[in-house]
Image (spheres, coloured by chain):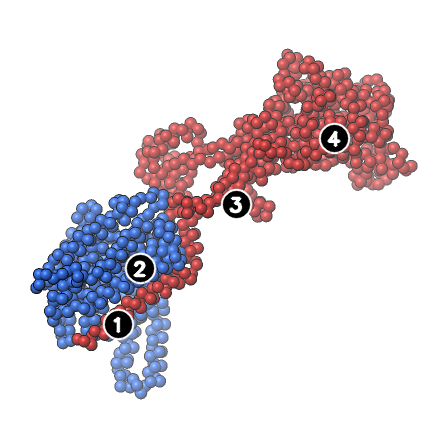
Chain colours: A blue, B red
Amino acid sequence: MRTSYKLTQNIDWITIGLYALMVILGWMNIYAAVYNPENVTNIFDFSLNSGKQLVWIGASVVIIVMLFAIDYKAYDSLAYVIYWFFILLLLGTLAFASEIKGSRSWLVITESIRLQPAEFAKFATALAVSKFMSSINLRQQNWKDQAKLAGLALLPPTIIILQNETGSALVFAAFTLAFFREGMSPLILIIGAVGVFVFVLTLLIPQWYLAAGVTVLMAAYGWFNFHRIKRFLYPYIGIWVAVLAVVFSVNFFVENVLQEHQRNRIKVLVDPDIDPLGVGWNVTQSKIAIGSGGFLGKGFLEGTQTKFDFVPEQSTDFIFCTVGEEHGWIGSLVLIALFMGLLIRIITVAERQRSVFGRTYGYCVASIIFFHFLVNVGMTIGLAPVVGIPLPFFSYGGSGLWSFTILLFILLAIDAHRKLDLGR
Amino acid sequence: MKYLEGRKYVIQAIFIAIGAVYLIKLFFIQVLDDSYKTAADNNAMRRVVQYPFRGLIYDRDGKLLVENTPVYDLMVVPKEAKAIDTLKFCQLVGLTLPEYREKIKAARTYSYVKPSPFLQRLTNAEFAAIQDNLVDFPGFYINARTVRGYPHQSLAHALGYIGEISPRQLEDSAYKGYRQGDYLGVSGIERQYEQYLMGQRGVKYTMVNVRGLEKGSFKDGAYDTLSVAGQNLITTIDLELQKYGEKLMQGKTGSIVAIEPKTGEILSLISAPYYDPSLLTGKELGNNYMKLLKDPVKPLFNRPLMATYPPGSIFKLAQALIAMQEGTLTPNTGYACNWSLVKCSHRHPHPSNLGIAIEQSCNPYFYQVFRSVVNKGRSANVFQDSHLGLDAWNKHIKSFGFASKLGIDLPNEKKGLMPNSQFYDKIYGPKGWKFPTIYSVSIGQGETGVTPLQMANFAATIANRGYYYTPHIVRSVGEKGKPLPAYSEKHYTSVDPRHFPAVVEGMQRVVESGTARYARLNHIGVVICGKTGTVQNPHGKDHSVFIAFAPKDDPKIAIAVYVENAGGGAIAAAPMASLMVEKYLNDSITTPARKRWEHDMVSGAFYKWGH
């Protein structure tokens, strides 16, 4: 290890620039969301979310400096330690935390400082799976290793579901994208996509029609292309049975396993009027806020829907409504472009890592941020179910901002030392 | 592992695809679909109509007749009023605990988050006491609004009142600017001058939050319009005279109308029985209105404009004027007081000229005067002659403003009745009537109907020696405005002004030595001219009527007094009219003798005097 290694020259300033831009824009939108025209307060007012967010941003800078100061090798070598530490923390929270807003996920440090370990479990799990990935050879199709990997990735969300934070748990599904890059069969992604497709279809179409439709289609295809499927007759029938199973099990899942409010969140995607004063209200008001923004938006602090409480959780989960209402389609374009730019930059950074650990971690970072973006923006415009997860760097909240900062800057810290790494 | 590197493109493609799908969806809802903008406006924008102050109404000297009085309602927002010291609050507003709970429950039933009235129309004392302590009771606040207020209890009929617009009016295109719940003038000046009094409503756009609570103005009020206060009205009414007249008429039924002859301005317009105008304001309007409506003495009936009576002997003045114009009478014409034609009210020497005839109010004399007009010899056929004669007479009498609406600036004026040939043809057939059939018209009985307003206008016409201005009650719209143009136009009668002095002389004699000696104003050096009338009433005691003007040579006031069932014109109407004139010209009644008269008139002593 050369001591004269110049850190600043190797830090990826493009990512940092994008990060800074997003955090500052987020902060301004939080101010707009909590802005009260009757009682105008300063953006720095610490009694408001915008003022507090500035504190979280300041703390993030400290965290960033610390992350660069720590020996970059520690992330690799201590990955499992960090992972198990957070598993214990999650279990501890589950056991001892008092219920806040229906979930046992908050760690109350002082009255005003509360942390959500579930947020930090993301980067810990990303480190652990990357570490594990770098230690095995996936191509050998060792089912034991695959099971261990799956176990590593599924343990935290299981505890989080027990904490009643289903939204945060869903995020762990994002790791499949990283696994895919490292060799996981695309079939799993395709099955996942088909599963979601069928899932939505079962909500749109009564299950018996759907079952009948699939049967008729497959029978017709089999009849006219019998010479082709002759060889795969049994697998073909197997697919038919599988699809029917999915259809009926989805229905069973939706009607019997999901809780009432969860069921409504999905159903509302199909029919916003299903629960007009509950979840349907949120989605409708959110779309009204964004839709009323027009092409150029109403202007900074001029939004009427995001103020006056028409949109719930304006500064946290529904922060995108403020962007859409006050800055219009152009604002949406800028926000989406920022996310696309950041995600592609992260992939570029990941791909230039010499270690499997670094690369896998990079993809985990990209996948997690992407999943949050996908669900958060999707729910505000009625394309995804309402799941309470924040929009990275934009949503108000210390735990969220810090966890994304740590997630991203561990990658940048590893990346900054990539030239020292010999790779495997 | 090289072959896996290609998968980075797959992953990037997924990212880009989702970003693109979202941008397209956003383009649809943000740019292409306008319904979200409408929904947003409906959500967060509230159009609040700003009601202007209704115009005030003053008397001719600038004394306030109608004002806007603030009333204070104590409002409550149940959601915010949860954590208060209930006991202390009950003490403050003077309620018992169960009453308090009842009221809170009622408010909560209406809305948990919107304000609703808790106590309405606080007195000033209550308001002061509560206002100071309200800071301790969140969720309660005072809402000020205005209702019509009346510093004096006078002139109710003419002022009219305002009320909520009726469902029928809402459908009428004439009221298209109004909305449900709006107030507008229902009668009197309030109705007639509605368009000036109402002012211009403003609109304020306020933003509301999800619970419907106001959150400030939209775009700092850039789209708001200010309300413009209604215009004030200066009436022609002399409040002191009006009050005095009402005092004289208390407990009686009838009218007093006083007009300034030079302008047609109405100095007082008294309809008895009358009511306190403040009864028809605010929330008790409906109840009080029903009470007044059911009252057997009909206090809501605006007699000066709506009651038509036979004019009685005051009509003899008109007969004389028309006959002189027709050339069948000169001031020196004498007729015998021939009781075989028609009975006279009392014994008196044969009137050898018009002056004496008026002074004595001689019925046979005016029988002959009227006959000379009707049967002037226009045709050899007696029926034809009466036809032509009556129609010629009718034209003249109409030029005095009888049998048609004068056009006063108040609603519901009645036109009255003066017969013509057509009228009698309908009753008796074309050959069924001639002069002896209709003779009672000569002395103002029979098929005649005149409103007290028309009588006063008649007095003003004689005072002016031949013309009148349409009587009106509003002198100017706005402090420096003018009356409506219709009221500055002279209306000449068809009788030449040169015929009027003889009648005026007769009227002077009526007061000096004739039937209305009680009306003399010699003690203040004023020459008053008048004419009594005693209207036969088949249902009871005669109606007492008197018209007059004064001073003779520079008339400042013309007056008609009509007191139902009071007996002869001389004993009720004449003294009242002269008291009114004295009050107007001299400001007060001073001598003990006149005070006695005043006392007798107010107390209605004449009801016991008999006839």
Q: Are marks 1 and 2 in contact (CB under 8 Å)?
A: no
Whole-percent x and y of residue B363? 81, 24
Residue type at the position of mark 4: Tyr
Q: Which residue is mark 4?
A: B467
Q: Which residue is mark 2?
A: A335
B576 sits left or right of B197 in the view = right
Which of the 4 image quarters holds residue A363?
bottom left
The answer for how far apart the CA atoms under marks 1 and 2 are is 22 Å
Label 4 – label 1 distance at C-alpha: 104 Å
Between marks 3 and 2 in the image, the one whose residue lies nearer the viewer: 2
Q: Assign a secondary structure to mark 2.
A: helix
In the picture, the quarter occupied by the N terminus of chain A is bottom left
Q: Which residue reaches farthest top?
A: B592
Residue for badge 1: B10
Residue in the foreground of this view, choosing between A363 and A94: A363
Distance in Å between CA atoms under marks 3 and 2: 47 Å
Q: Report whether mark 3 lies on the same chain as mark 4.
A: yes
Q: What residue do we see at 37% from left, 52% from top?
A: A299
Q: Is residue A352 visible?
A: yes
Q: Is residue B376 above or below residue B213?
A: above
The three-letter code of the residue at mark 1 reads: Val
Q: SS at mark 3? A: loop
Q: Chain of mark 2?
A: A
Check the image and report above or below for B253 versus A386: above
Cα distance, mark 3 to mark 4? 45 Å
Query: Residue A290: in sight, yes or no?
Result: no
**Which residue bears the numbered disc 3?**
B179
Q: Counting other residues with Cα less than 10 Å from the Cα at mark 2, is it few (<14), some (14-19), or many (20 or more)? A: many
Q: Give the quadrant of the C terminus of chain A.
A: bottom left
Residue A266 left/right relative to B40: left
Q: Chain of mark 1?
A: B
